[in-house]
Image (cartoon, helix red, strand yellow):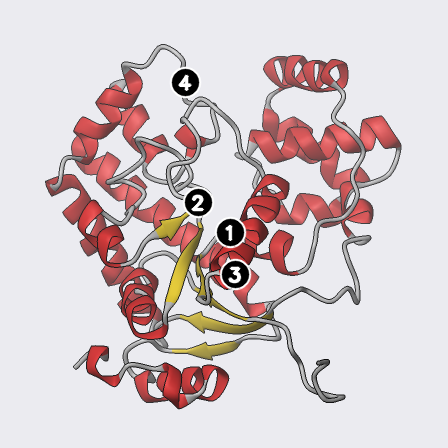
Amino acid sequence: MAPPSGIDSRPLAIALMGPTASGKTALAVEWAQRLRSEIVSVDSALVYRGLDIGAAKPDAATQALAPHRLIDIRDPHETYNAGEFAVDALAAMRAIAAGGRIPLLVGGTGLYFRALLDGLAEMPESDPAVRAAVAAEARERGWAALHADLTRVDPAAAARIRPSDPQRISRAVEVFRTSGRPLSEWQAGARRGMRFPFRVLRLMLAPADRAVLHQRIAQRFDAMLDSGFLAEVRRLRSDPRLHPDLPAMRAVGYRQAWAHLEGATDAATFRAQAIAATRQLAKRQLTWLRAEHAARWLDPVHQRAELEAALALFVGPSSLDPDRAAV
């Protein structure tokens, strides 16, 4: 029988978004145990096998408590994009819902969330010849010069892309040269008004005090070093298929560790650069999250009661297991 008019019968899902080191994983594991839910990772680094310590990947014990989907699905020499993620994540969500559980989307990769929840615009197909020409020009002139070119033809895209991000600069320049239209114009055609097949509670986790987040970032990175992060990167560097321009190896922390192991920096400089890069990542993530107007912002420590209330209102109090709540 069809549901009464006005009743939203779509299955439930929860999106737990937030910058790196904001406490998403710990809260997600707790909720997964309390809610009959299953975690879908929304993190562009966690998709890669072998990126464990530096990506803060949940360990085997944590994943035994709360299984995570879309972790360790690519080797680090392979690529993986937001469009592929959207397809894989929606398939995972449907499978979780079919099993009577609630999908719990957890991560901080804004482009992945946008691709899944809001859709990606139709884009021109990649042209290998144009891409090769862009790469050759970058070798001659430098990526900063190509970024300056992009500023003239597509200022909106250039404002979102760092001059040190060759992958995104290359794609934006390629799109313009292939189609004659700016990338930002193509992106403006993303899905509008289409109904996502799940009803999603969007929650943003972020400490109200930015200094607290910065402290957590530094403490977590030091813990990574103590856990063998540099040994992990040494193992990755021993793989002849890997090089520092691959998306996996450009992940924050890994890029700085690779340069350090090549002798480009001393230990103190490496640590400072990696922490600074992680803080910059958190800032970019927060910038994207602020544009997510449909979400509710909450401090994971000081607004715990509000988090619990929002969750209970969405899933129903009877769906929560109070015995598993954190004390």
* On-image quarter of the N terminus: bottom right
* Residue matched to label 2: 70
- Residue depth check, mark 2 versus mark 1: number of the one nearer the observer: 1
For marks 2 and 3, give the CA distance.
18 Å
* Residue matched to label 4: 243
- Residue depth check, mark 3 versus mark 4: number of the one nearer the observer: 3
- Residue depth check, mark 2 versus mark 3: number of the one nearer the observer: 3
Q: Identify which amino acid the numbered label 1 is placed on.
A: Ala
Q: Residue at x 27, y 40 (%)?
A: 54
Res. 149 in view:
yes
Q: Residue at x 39, y 58 (%)?
A: 39
Which one is earlier in the sequence, the residue at label 1 or at label 3? 1
Task: Say few, some or many: other residues with alpha carbon within 10 Å of mark 3 (under 14 / 14 to 19 / 20 or more).
Answer: few
Q: Identify which amino acid the numbered label 2 is placed on.
A: Leu
Which one is earlier in the sequence, the residue at label 3 or at label 4? 3
Q: Identify which amino acid the numbered label 4 is placed on.
A: His
